[in-house]
Image: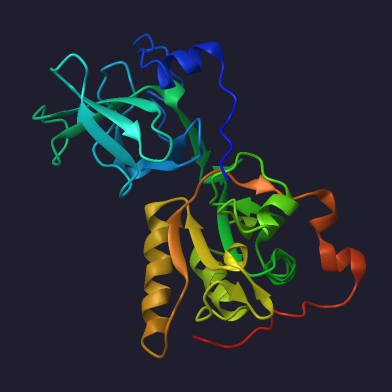
Amino acid sequence: MKRYRNLSLSEEQIIVHKETETPGSGAYEDLTEEGVYVCRRCDSPLYLSNSKFISSCGWPSFDDEINNAVIKTPDADGRRVEILCNRCGGHLGHVFSGEGFTKKNIRHCVNSASMLFVPAFIDGHERAIFAGGCFWGVEYFLAKEKGVLKVTSGYVGGKVINPTYEEVSSGLTGHAEAVEVIFDKSTSFLNLAKVFFEIHNPSQSDGQGPDIGPQYRSEIFYLTKAQYDDAKKLIAMLSATGSVATKLTPAGPFYAAEDYHQNYYQKKGGTPYCHQRKNRF
């Protein structure tokens, strides 16, 4: 199941018909915020912000892509190498080498119109996205942690734009039930990731407790290289004593779930049936 984002006429001209936006006109050329750049048409993660650099060429520039995110192919003019989204085939721009801008000596020259930016920070507060079974239970426990300002249940990591609960529950969209956590500096991503690993079974694949299916998988959707490094460190610690099924994946857009899923146990009463906290560290 796939559903792409509706494009404006100018976006379609670039992504579908392979035109190029006017240099200096794009929203992301000089953006230096931390986060993930994804395909505007299909949400597929393309670049982490730590690979972005200012080249003053008129378009956003990156010296590395997310693994398997793009396709490189000879351009129709025979002189350049075109880059396409590996998921939907949308036109991104061109890639050049030998210019000496960075140590990697590569420049992905990408149209801003081909991308959307998924920020790691909102109003100065960091975001984290965790998937570990039914989002009701994950939300319940993480909302109790010191420094957590807001927890939202929703969907991430799939191939359908703005999915519904019914679509995600089919297991066909590729999304995971997940929670978005906004937190202040009195805690850290590392601390919250430890809690995440302690409130579900990270060794269980394709489900959590009695909830079985790919939408209930264990996965951390990281927004920065630092989040990836912290999560990888915790997985290495857990792997020393057992198997870990938790995946690490660059975050795409997070879609908030329907209102009746938010603060579920606070509204309904009771406690999670498939999440309990267990000391793992």
User: Which residue is farthest right?
Assistant: 268
Q: 224 and 68: which one is in front? A: 68
Q: 79 and 234: which one is in front? A: 79
Q: Where does residue 173 sit, x and y in percent of width and height?
A: 59, 51
| Residue at 26% over, 17% down | 57
Say if 55 sits above or below 118 in the image. Answer: above
User: In the visual, does 84 lie left or right of 246?
Assistant: left
Say if 242 sits above or below 69 in the image. Answer: below
The colour style of the image is rainbow
User: Which residue is farthest left?
Assistant: 98
Say if 88 sits above or below 232 in the image. Answer: above
| Residue at 56% over, 33% down | 4
**Quarter of the figure with residue 5:** top right
| Residue at 31% over, 16% down | 58
Q: Where does residue 155 sit, x and y in percent of width and height?
A: 64, 52
Say if 47 sits above or below 265 in the image. Answer: above
**Quarter of the figure with residue 113:** top left
Q: Where does residue 64 sit, x and y in percent of width and height?
A: 26, 41
Q: 132 and 225: which one is in front? A: 132
Q: Where does residue 18 sit, x and y in percent of width and height?
A: 36, 17
**Quarter of the figure with residue 227:** bottom left
